[in-house]
Image: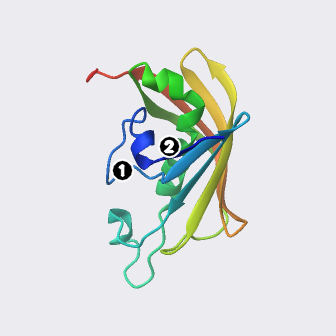
Amino acid sequence: MEILNRDQIKTFLPHREPMLLVDDVTKEGDEAVAHYHVRGDEFFLQGHFPGNPIVPGVILCEIMGQSMCILVRDELAAGRIPLYSGIKEARFRQPVKPGDTIEIRGHITERRSLIFYAEAEAKVNGKTAVKGVLSFALIDNPNK
């Protein structure tokens, strides 16, 4: 099992700071397992909320989506970029705060050409923070 760090993830995922929101990712069978440590200085915490910073739900969904990257690594390495096409059944169970390390697990449930559907869940300290069904399309990267 190979654990990929941020620099290795950048070889196939087009996201860059400050929008690269995965610290490491690995593939375990047909499942992606990733982590992101919330440092507290992220741009999305600056106004959400002063004195009580909480990671926005949409950012948690973005973290889950980026975490699925290893499952389509070959397609991304071929010069494609992922674009969200939908989020269904997203359920937010507990807030995520600075100092928390998020563990994301997910798997592809369906593929239609270059459109993928995945079930993903993000946990902090073993408790579900968010889970949902994500869909994303891979399109040709105009920069490659």
Question: What residue is at 45 percent from the left and 41 percent from the top?
Answer: 9
Q: Depth check: give the residue in front, 76 or 47.
A: 76
Image side of residue 66 versus residue 141, left or right: right
Estimate how packed mark 2 is, as few (under 14), some (14 to 19) or many (20 or more) residues with alpha carbons within 10 Å: many
Instruction: Determine whether 100 is above or below 15 in the image.
Output: below
Q: Kindly indicate the quadrant of the structure image that contains residue 35.
A: bottom right
Instruction: Determine whether 138 is above or below 24 in the image.
Output: above
Estimate how packed mark 1 is, as few (under 14), some (14 to 19) or many (20 or more) residues with alpha carbons within 10 Å: some
Cα separation, mark 2 vs mark 1, equals 10 Å
Instruction: Name the residue type under label 2.
Output: Gln
Question: What residue is at 45 percent from the left and 82 percent from the top?
Answer: 52
Q: Residue lying furthest front in this view?
A: 1
Question: What residue is at 39 percent from the left and 39 percent from the top?
Answer: 10
Q: Residue lying furthest bottom in this view?
A: 51
Instruction: Determine whether 129 is above or below 67 in the image.
Output: below
> Which coloring applies here?
rainbow
Q: Horizontal and vertical percent for residue 89?
A: 67, 46
* Residue that badge 2 annotates: 66
Q: Horizontal and vertical percent for residue 53?
A: 44, 76
Question: What residue is at 34 percent from the left and 72 percent from the top?
Answer: 47
Q: Horizontal and vertical percent for residue 118?
A: 65, 36
Q: Secondary structure at mark 1?
A: loop
Instruction: Determine whether 102 is above or below 12 in the image.
Output: below
* Residue that badge 1 annotates: 19
Image side of residue 91 versus residue 51, left or right: right
Instruction: Name the residue type under label 1.
Output: Met
- Which quadrant is home to the N terminus? top right
